[in-house]
């Protein structure tokens, strides 16, 4: 075992946990879930059976990642953010269907954000704290609000590079000088 599980956390047999991953207080990682290498899983995080979390991700306290959610590499998920997986939730519905959600590499999701299933969060996109994402977010797009609306475009480093509604032809960052086409 090349990962750490705090004595109060539950990592069920059958969970695939990558080397260097640290699972902290009261977290619950279900059998059939996958966690990549070098992740930090905060206090009271729940990772459901069938959920996939890439490498080098940081899931802050109280995050819930349900079956049908796939998170890429280098993703940040802020405290108490949650994902849904059912578009028509009813306690009595025995035939409910999982609707998948994908978070691509390098994206950041702010504290208390809700990601409604069926959405894709693009590469290096940024979802503001408290946002409710009801539709897909483009690569490098910054969104905020309830429901989340576009506010601009961000660099790989996270700096806002444009407040335009439409994506600029290139994203040259004044902060790190990186340029993405």
Image (cartoon, rainbow, N blue to C red):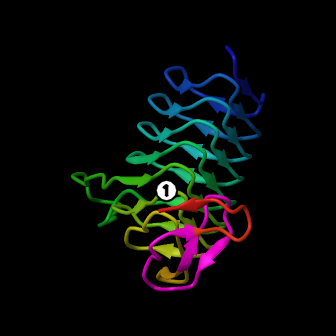
Residue 21 locus on image (x, y percent) = 68, 30
* Element marked by disc 1: loop
Vertical placement of residue 53 versus 162, above or below = above
Q: Is residue 89 left or right of residue 164?
A: left
Asked whether 166 falls inside the magenta stretch, the response is: yes
Q: Is residue 42 left or right of residue 119?
A: right
- Locate the N terminus by quadrant: top right
Q: What is the crowding at mark 1: few (fewer than 14 residues within 10 Å), some, or many (at least 20)?
A: many
Q: Residue furthest left?
A: 95
Q: Nearer the viewer, residue 161 or 158?
A: 161
Residue 46 locus on image (x, y percent) = 59, 45
Q: Main secondary structure of the magenta part?
A: loop
What span is in magenta? 152-171
Q: Is residue 138 left or right of residue 178?
A: left
Residue 12 visible to the viewer: yes
Please give the residue where the numbered disc 1 appears in the rendered image.
123
| Quadrant position of residue 10 | top right
Q: Nearer the viewer, residue 14 or 73?
A: 73
Residue 47 locus on image (x, y percent) = 54, 42
Which residue is painted at 64% across and 66% down in the image? 110
Vertical placement of residue 129 versus 62, above or below = below
Asked whether 44 falls inside the magenta stretch, the response is: no
Residue 129 visible to the viewer: no
Residue 152 locus on image (x, y percent) = 54, 80
Vertical placement of residue 19 versus 66, above or below = above
Which residue is painted at 44% across and 73% down in the image? 169
Q: Nearer the viewer, residue 175 or 131?
A: 175
Vertical placement of residue 128 versus 22, above or below = below
Which residue is painted at 70% across and 22% down in the image? 3
């Amino acid at each position: 075992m090349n990962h750490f599980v705090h004595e109060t956390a539950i990592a069920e047999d059958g969970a695939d946990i990558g080397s260097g991953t640290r699972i902290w207080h009261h977290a619950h990682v279900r059998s059939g879930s996958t966690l990549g290498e070098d992740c930090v899983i905060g206090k009271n995080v729940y990772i459901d059976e069938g959920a996939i979390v890439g490498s080098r991700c940081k899931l802050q306290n109280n995050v819930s990642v349900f079956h049908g959610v796939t998170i890429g590499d280098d993703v940040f998920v802020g405290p108490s953010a949650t994902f849904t997986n059912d578009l028509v939730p009813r306690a009595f519905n025995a035939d409910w269907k999982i609707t998948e959600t994908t978070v691509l590499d390098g994206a950041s999701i702010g504290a208390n954000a809700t990601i409604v299933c069926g959405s894709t969060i693009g590469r290096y996109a940024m979802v503001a704290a408290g946002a409710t994402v009801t539709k897909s977010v483009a690569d490098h797009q910054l969104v905020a609000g309830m429901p989340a609306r576009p506010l601009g475009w961000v660099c790989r480093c996270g700096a806002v590079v444009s407040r335009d509604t439409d994506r600029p032809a290139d994203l040259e960052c004044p902060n790190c000088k990186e340029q993405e086409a």
